[in-house]
Amino acid sequence: MHSKTIAELAAGLKKGDFSSEELTRSFLQRIQQFDPELNSFITVSEEHALTQAKAADAVIAKGNATALTGIPLAQKDIFCTNGIKTTCGSKMLDNFIAPYDSTVIRNFNQAGSVMMGKTNMDEFAMGSSNETSFYGGVKNPWDILTVPGGSSGGSAAAVAARLVPASTGTDTGGSIRQPAALCGITGLKPTYGRVSRYGMIAFASSLDQAGTFTQTAEDSALMLNVMAGFDEKDSTSVDKAVPDYTADLNKNLKGLKIGLPKEYFGEGLNADVAKVVEEAIAEYKKMGAEIIEISLPNSHLSVPAYYVIAPAECSSNLSRFDGVRFGYRCDDPKDLEDLYKRSRGEGFGDEVKRRIMIGAYALSAGYYDAYYLKAQKIRHLISDDFKQAFEKVDVIMGPTSPEVAFKAGEKSGDPVSMYLSDIYTIATNLAGLPGMSVPCGFSNNLPVGLQIIGNYFDESRLLNVAHQYQQTTDWHVRIPDAYK
Ligand code: GLN
């Protein structure tokens, strides 16, 4: 049962092969068995899950099921959940119980899915390895000595080990695509504004976007059908009709124009990863796609621009955690200033503090023009590069990550080398474009991800392109031996 996709499980529920309660109990049992080692969950909401499963069974019995009714899912611990702890991977929010549901959670509740728990993540979604979590690192099911990627590492590891059929994540600079690649599963980051950010704890508001981790592109489409849509509670959510994302999955790819940015295949890319990605692209050629070399000339500026913009926004967003309104408060403060200083000093981890300091510096009078304004100008240039590219091609492909999963501890002392993990994903966020990572092979027995970037609101095409590849390859159904 645990290796089935959402589509297969939904068919089984409908036919009565098993109930949602049975399904939920069987995944809860896997979580109990495997998660003490993987550490992919911060909270397992067993009681809540069983209540939702029973309610789903009643809906199914009445014949009113949607594709997600009764399906167990895990939610990144960045989405506020009414009555269930939401920590964002931080000591700061270790005691925080939101009084409301984020829109993403509300949408899943309305669809009747079952929330199994909240997944582990880098603190406030800052990281590429899941090592900055207050709750400890997450292990990669393919090799427990390696990291699952980050910041949505718990969500990715849980799906890779088949502790849940699918999960949610958020992607500010690569936090869905990079862990999906490192864990050998399918990750989708939609266009900025496609999914509501309401109730999703903010890291960098102009970049954050919620998305999915699944085994297949078809399942990503089913998840996005539930998540996408306008929300008046999020002023950046876009009022655009939501198509049925499964409708185009079966279109054939003859004549599809695939752009390969030469900047994504140069120095810094592991040779083995490059080979695996090139083989995947050759597969697309066989399916009738046309390969066109393109250039995204400002690519090399994406990491520096991001590491000004994202910290600047986070320094402002995280000012709300002051020991007064939310979460952690230090013991016995002397006065108000001491309360602020010690609550923040004790509540935040090192990486979060580093970002707040960089951001406050970049925004300070006298430095604003030199850093923040300049980074915003670069952001424009990067978006323009993509606009020009999409005049010639339908999708852009390349590696998701420059290398496969690295060893825990390998980069945690070297922030710049950690930041470079997102060298191929960050530009997409700066431009607001949708992107996917699809399993496309192995190097050193560790999974490699193919990144597919689409034009604005072209998720249907991305899903179609990924789905067709998954019809002719089986990388996405591979499961690490210990979790078969
Ligand atoms: N790894 C990047 C960072 O640390 C991206 C994080 C994310 O997408 N949330 O900022």
Image: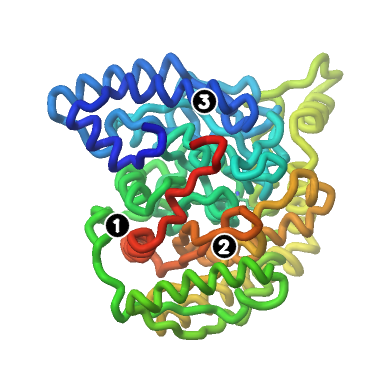
Give the residue at mark 3. 31
Q: In this view, does 176 lie to the left or right of 404?
A: left
Amino acid at the residue labelled 1 = Lys
Q: Position of residue 210 (x, y in %)?
A: 47, 47
Q: Which of marks 2 and 3 is nearer the N terminus?
A: 3
Tell me if residue 361 comes above or below residue 251 in the rendering: above
In the picture of the structure, the residue carrying the numbered disc 1 is 240
Q: Where is residue 372 in the image (x, y as percent from the top left)?
A: 69, 63
Q: What element carries label 3?
A: helix
Q: Are marks 2 and 1 in contact (CB under 8 Å)?
A: no
Q: Nearer the viewer, mark 1 or mark 3?
A: 3
Label 1 neighbourhood size at 10 Å, few (<14), some (14-19), many (20+)?
Answer: few
Residue under the point 38% across and 76% down? 394
Type of amino acid at the residue the image marks with label 2: Thr
Which residue is denoted by mark 2 in the rendering? 400
- Tell me the quarter of the image containing the N terminus: top left
Q: Residue at x 75, y 44 (%)?
A: 408
Numbered disc 2: secondary structure: loop
